[in-house]
C-alpha cells in the first residue's frame, strides 16, 4: 500500500469524518472478501449480492465504531457473518445443490470448473463454522489472529478447528480424486 489513497487506516479515518469517497474506496477494496464469505455461507449468487449490500450499509452506518486499522477486516467479516445468520433466521432455508445435480444440467466441463464445483459441493456439506474458517483462511488469506477475531476464538483454538475442518472436508472429497487432479 504505497499510496495514501489505499492506506486503510487513512481511509477509515476519512470515512469516519464523513468522506464518501473514502467509504466508497473501502467498499471497493473489501467487496470481494465480503461477497466470498457470504457466498460460501449461502451458496446463492443473488442472495449473496443482496446480503453483501446489506453488509456494507451496516458498515457505513457503524464506521465510527472502528477503533483501528487492524480490526477493520475482522469487523467487516463479523458483520457479514451476522447478516447471513439473520437472513437464515428470517427465511429458515438452507438450499444447496449437489455436484451430481449440477453435472446433469451442464454435461461436460473443463477440469478447472469440475474441480471448483466439487470443492464447492464439499464445502457446502460442512457445518457453517468449518466453511467460514476454511474460507477466511484459504480463500481470503486472513492470518490466525484475524480469523480468531472474526470467529471470537483463541488463535490456538482456530488452529485446531481449521485442522479438524480440513479433515472433514477431505472426507467429503473422497471419491472425487479424478476431478481434483
Image: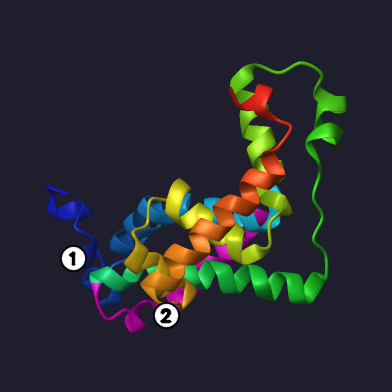
| Front position in the image: 153 or 46 | 153
Q: Residue at x 81, y 44 (%)?
A: 97
Tell me how the rendering is colored.
Answer: rainbow
Apparent side of residue 151 relative to residue 83 in the rendered image (left or right) = left
The magenta stretch spans which residues?
47-68
Q: Residue at x 52, y 54 (%)?
A: 134
In the picture of the structure, the residue carrying the numbered disc 2 is 62
Q: Quadrant of residue 102?
A: top right
Q: Earlier in the sequence, mark 2 or mark 1?
A: 1
Q: Position of residue 177 (x, y in %)?
A: 66, 27
Q: Quadrant of residue 47?
A: bottom right
Give me the C-alpha separation between circle 2 and circle 1.
Answer: 17 Å
In the picture of the structure, the residue carrying the numbered disc 1 is 10
Q: Label 2 crowding class (10 Å Cα cut-off): few <14, some 14-19, many 20+?
A: few
Mark 2 lies on a secondary structure that is: helix
Q: Position of residue 10 (x, y in %)?
A: 18, 65
Apparent side of residue 42 relative to residue 155 in the rendered image (left or right) = right
Apparent side of residue 51 relative to residue 32 in the rendered image (left or right) = right
Q: Judge whether residue 115 is colored magenta.
A: no
Q: Residue at x 81, y 27 (%)?
A: 103
Amino acid at each position: 500500500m504505497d499510496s495514501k489513497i489505499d492506506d486503510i487506516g487513512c481511509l477509515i479515518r476519512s470515512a469516519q469524518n464523513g468522506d464518501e469517497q473514502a467509504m466508497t474506496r473501502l467498499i471497493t477494496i473489501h467487496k470481494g472478501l465480503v461477497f466470498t464469505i457470504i457466498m460460501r455461507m449461502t451458496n446463492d449468487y443473488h442472495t449473496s449480492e443482496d446480503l453483501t449490500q446489506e453488509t456494507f450499509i451496516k458498515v457505513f452506518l457503524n464506521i465510527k465504531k472502528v477503533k483501528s486499522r487492524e480490526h477493520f477486516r475482522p469487523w467487516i467479516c463479523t458483520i457479514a457473518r451476522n447478516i447471513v445468520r439473520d437472513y437464515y433466521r428470517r427465511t429458515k432455508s438452507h438450499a444447496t445443490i449437489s455436484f451430481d445435480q449440477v453435472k446433469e444440467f451442464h454435461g461436460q466441463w473443463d477440469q478447472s470448473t469440475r474441480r471448483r464445483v466439487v470443492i464447492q459441493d464439499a464445502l457446502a456439506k460442512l457445518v457453517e463454522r468449518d466453511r467460514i474458517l476454511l474460507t477466511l483462511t484459504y480463500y481470503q488469506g486472513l492470518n490466525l489472529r484475524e480469523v480468531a477475531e472474526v470467529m471470537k476464538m483463541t488463535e490456538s483454538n482456530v488452529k485446531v478447528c481449521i485442522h479438524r475442518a480440513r479433515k472433514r472436508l477431505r472426507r467429503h472429497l473422497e471419491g472425487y480424486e479424478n476431478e481434483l487432479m
